[in-house]
Amino acid sequence: MTIQPWVWFATIGVLVAVLLVDVLVIGRRPHEPSMRECTTWIGMYVGLAVVFGIGVYFFAGGQYAGEFFAGWITEYSLSIDNLFVFLVILTRFGVPRAYQQTALLIGIILALVMRGIFIALGAAAINTFAWVFYIFGAILIYTAVQFVRSGNDHDSDYKENVLIRWAKNHLPATDQYNGVKLTLVENGKRLVTPMLMVMIALGTTDLLFALDSIPAIYGLTKEPYLVFAANVFALMGLRQLYFLIGGLVTRLVYLPIGLAVILGFIGAKLIMHALHENNLPFLNGGEPLHSVPDIGIAVSLSVIVGTLLVTTVASLAKSRRTERRERQEEPARSGRSAD
């Protein structure tokens, strides 16, 4: 897939323009978005992603279009899991609801910049070292195991990193918010507000998520252009998605298992691809193992979509059963309290 420089610049220009509109709108009026506002923005972002994928189909063919959609769906699914950790961060820092979407927006923009760096490094590594697929595959399988172990305990997924601890220990800070501003003046001294810590936490935490998501999407497509586009579209609606499904996201109890299956599958796919095109001298004499199957994008897309559907349906069914049982037990608890 040959991408001309002007296509790169045009794509980045359009996506940056969309983000600037979002920044200017939010920057003028920090608030907790309504359900209608969230639905409108998410619908627009999803529509743009679908139009982009259709464009890829017409200009580059079904193979690359399938790779984009598989990558976008996978990244979007991983982004939903990010929402759990975002919720933990915003809760721990006590961010007022009216300021949460501004904090999320800045954190996501920082994450986009950092993911762009990871994408470039990943592309360079793939082009230079074919054996990097073994490493990517191992990372994803390890992450899949961690998803299964942690389950829905997302409090353990977030730990203050070195940068946050350094900022807390070395920067003059206050525990008072000053709107969405990063500093305030108190007794003639300028102090940083908790909003700065929140933005650092969101940006660096999403950077850690990129360590999993970038290898995952490179397991579906080797085209940096598609990797970049899929990541941008997946992160674009994350802020609105946070408010739209804030209650629903806690009901997706089997999401970690579903993501573990997807990441484990892609990890195995990467290792199989590496074996299929092997050039390591100590393995099979440096010759490719053509007997190892190379899984196509159609199979990958089917596994990803099928796993997410099963995970979502099973999660919502379990949540309904739990809610029904709690309603049935409520009268009994009330009776015991009265006694």
Image (tube, grey):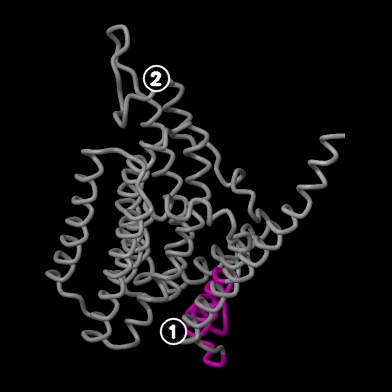
Dominant secondary structure, magenta: helix
Q: Which mark is residue 183?
A: none
Looking at the picture, how far across and down is residue 17, in whole percent?
A: 17, 56
Q: Which residues are magenta?
A: 262-291
Observer-nearest residue: 333 or 31?
A: 333
Q: Which mark is residue 297?
A: 1
- Which residue is identified by label 2? 173
Q: Does residue 338 belong to the magenta stretch?
A: no
The Cα atoms of the two marked residues, 2 and 1, are separated by 50 Å
Specify the quadrant of the image occupied by residue 76.
Answer: bottom left
Residue type of the residue flagged with mark 2: Ala
The residue at 25%/38% (across/down) is 29
Looking at the picture, how far across and down is residue 339, in whole percent?
A: 87, 34
The answer to whether 115 is drawn above or below residue 162 in the figure is: below
The residue at 52%/74% (across/down) is 266
Specify the quadrant of the image occupied by residue 47.
Answer: bottom left
